[in-house]
Amino acid sequence: MSFIIMQDHPQWRSVRLLMINRPEKHNALTLAMWEQLLEYLLQCDADPSVRLVILRGVDDTAFCSGADISEFPTYRANKEQAKLHKQITDRTTQRLATLRPLTLAAISGACFGGGLQLATACDIRLAHESARFAITPVKLGFVYGPYETNLLKRIVGEATAKELLYTGASITAQEALRVGLITKICPNSTNLEQFTNQMIHSLLQAAPEAQQITKKMFEHLASDDAITHYTALEHMANRTLDRPEYREGIQAFLEKRQPHYAQQQKSTQHNRE
């Protein structure tokens, strides 16, 4: 049985689903699962037809309860083993954070530790009202790593990040929304899958190349030397003005219709070939 499942979305061919499939363990991640997830992310990155990647649990039991602590005596028994373990989890998280397609975490149930690490690496985080969030390494005697700490700080700010990391306390979806940890909250009366599909529909209405350039700008602006990138980012943004997507977007607005970006994307890819 595969503990990470990758498949096309049944409604949109440009959307790839990555599902954590270990509900009996609240989707706790083994080291092998981190490696499998990385392999699937690399495949998504290399496929030009993929515009959006959805990360979720296989059902509503849990998003991910974090690393499988029962493996720690085997794979993190000493400093060297812990370092190797961290290298794998970091590679997976960094790949997710810099993936070419947009990324969306659809969160239900527990989103703890390594699960929250993955969620914060996504562009958008949707959560069911029943979801709960926590980062608990301090309760287990070790430290949340610098890369994921920085991801968290960028999203919620330093004060909230410190509170979450220093206490290891869990918070509700409502509190997560208040501090900016999640993008939107799905009410109990609504199915999370349907709620996610509404967001997918909205994202796919926009121009794909413009989205990817915008995402790249966010990556550069998050770096310590962001100011040195401004000229390059301006050039990157201005590239869209020469693209069919821009002409189609303006023409559709003037004609009071929905833009047809899919056709423009195919035309652009054909011209490049």
Image (tube, rainbow, N blue to C red):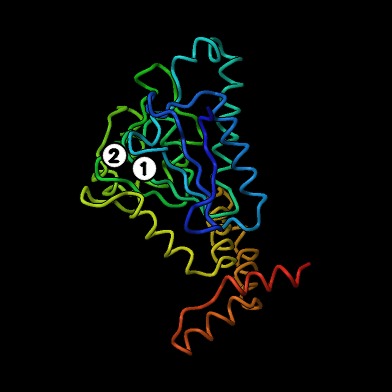
Q: Is residue 182 left or right of residue 80?
A: left
Q: Which residue is situated farthest in the bottom direction here?
A: 255
The residue shown at (49%, 69%) is 206
Q: Earlier in the sequence, mark 2 or mark 1?
A: 1
Check disc 1: other Cα within 10 Å, few if <14, some if 14-19, many if 20+.
many
Secondary element at image label 2: loop
| Camera-nearest residue between 115 and 201 | 201
Q: Is residue 59 left or right of residue 13?
A: left
- Residue 264 spot, x, y in % from top left: 62, 74
| Camera-nearest residue between 118 and 262 | 262
Residue 131, which numbered label? 2
What residue type is disc 2 on?
Ala
The residue shown at (47%, 48%) is 54
Whether tag 2 and tag 1 are in contact, CB under 8 A, the answer is yes
The residue pinned by badge 1 equals 107
Q: Which residue is situated farthest in the right direction here?
A: 273
Q: Quadrant of residue 74?
A: top right
Q: Is residue 134 left or right of residue 220?
A: left
Secondary element at image label 1: strand
Q: Is residue 273 left or right of residue 161?
A: right
Check disc 2: other Cα within 10 Å, few if <14, some if 14-19, many if 20+.
many
The residue shown at (37%, 22%) is 138
Q: Which residue is situated farthest in the left direction here?
A: 189
- Residue 51 spot, x, y in % from top left: 56, 58
- Residue 47 spot, x, y in % from top left: 66, 52
Residue 81, which numbered label? none
What residue type is disc 1 on?
Ile
| Camera-nearest residue between 37 and 119 | 37
